[in-house]
Image (cartoon, rainbow, N blue to C red):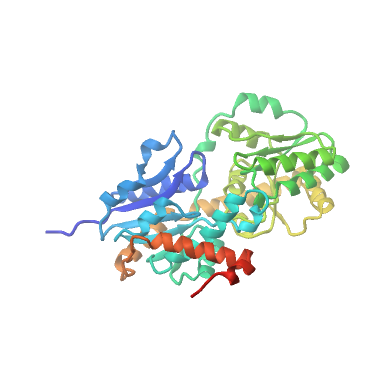
Amino acid sequence: MPSRPPAIHQVLATLAYGDAIGHEVLGIQRVLREAGYESEIFVETADRTLESLTRDYRELVDASHPDNLLLHHFSIGSRASRTAFALPDRMALIYHNITPPEYFAGIHRTLARQCFRGRREIRAYIDRCDLAMGDSEFNRQDLEAFGFSRTAVLPVVPDFSHLDRPPDGFVANQYDDDWTNILFVGRVISNKKIEDLIRFFHVYHTAFNPRSRLLIVGAFSMFERYLAALHHLIAELGLSHVHFSGHISDEELVAYYSVADLFLCASEHEGFCVPLVEAFYSEVPVLAYAATAVPATLDGAGVLFDDKDPQLVAGLMDAIVSDPDLQDAILAGQAAALERLHSQDFGGILLGLVDQIIAAPRAVPPRVARDFWEQFDAAEQLEELRLDRPSIYKALPWS
């Protein structure tokens, strides 16, 4: 009798609408199902529009089998992660990067703590996983720095179908005029360094082009304190024509890309940064700070800068916006980079990695005592004391 074919399920904390990770998760499931594998998506939470595509993470226990493979999208630690950790299934990690916590200190204490703990908790999976995959070379190197010895790259091949729709008429009519639109797309979150965008725009707007506006497109929920600081900076500079969209629909996103004259990015920490290649697809010239994974994502296209002097960056902005021939050259380079990205055989790479995992000797199944994660959390709290309150840590009774 033939052996049971393994199921290959995905596990993650949340499946979000319009999220780059969500697009990848659905793409992985599509490839696996087309290859004949049973494949479900187990989550703690999901956007209401995507709930029908998911199963509750607690059902993992019933779906578990030692021959199965769990593709675990690790973020900042979750109940879904911890449930999957304890099961006898094989496991491969897919790592999308965890932002260093110092970016959130003083801005979002809870997220700073979650990122700190997430970057430590991931080390618990070093011996649990048969393979750890980063969705970029930068993320793969991050995994090596954590201590994973078996690593690979499962490349991001963005799905642009959400951009293949008519633009929202209200947004298009609001900004489609003879003004220059400088665009950034991404969450309004502190590692994105929105304050630097504002400073760059201030110099550009006052010294080069007063008929210009800055469009910052992305959700800011849970970062209201950061948003308030940005508004304070705008007021201090006496700056106008800076617009925050908040969370938007796909049609609105298409409209913002359609009216943009330049995509400007000042982010200091990115694992990939999908909006950069969305701008390629939308034929918007890109000017970006050369940090972390950004140079690799641009793949020789766009324009990079490594000095955040506002006068310098504003000069680059003006040089691009005011020179049609330069814009054409930049767009040609971006189109070539996009073609290279599309030429990657994502499905073939994924299935090849799956075959590699299944054929190789598996990691030793975990032995997880009932209080394993309670003890892990206690150790984390002690480590936080050791780092942040050393005098209290030294005063603890260790008898």
Q: Is residue 308 above or below residue 216?
A: below
Q: Give the residue displayed 81% in from the left and 55% down from the top.
A: 309
Residue 1 location in percent, x, y? 11, 59
Quarter occupied by residue 128: bottom left
How many numbered discs sit on the rendered protein? 0
Question: In the depicted view, which residue is nearer to us: 42 or 298?
Answer: 42
Question: In the depicted view, which residue is nearer to us: 369 or 336?
Answer: 369
Q: Residue furthest right?
A: 207
Q: Is residue 249 above or below residue 225?
A: above
Residue 286 location in percent, x, y? 68, 48
Q: Give the residue displayed 44% in from the left and 48% down from the top.
A: 13
Quarter occupied by residue 371: bottom left
Q: Residue furthest left?
A: 1
Q: Give the residue displayed 40% in from the left and 65% down from the top.
A: 131
Q: Is residue 121 visible?
A: yes
Quarter occupied by residue 372: bottom left
Q: Give the residue displayed 48% in from the left and 75% down from the top.
A: 399
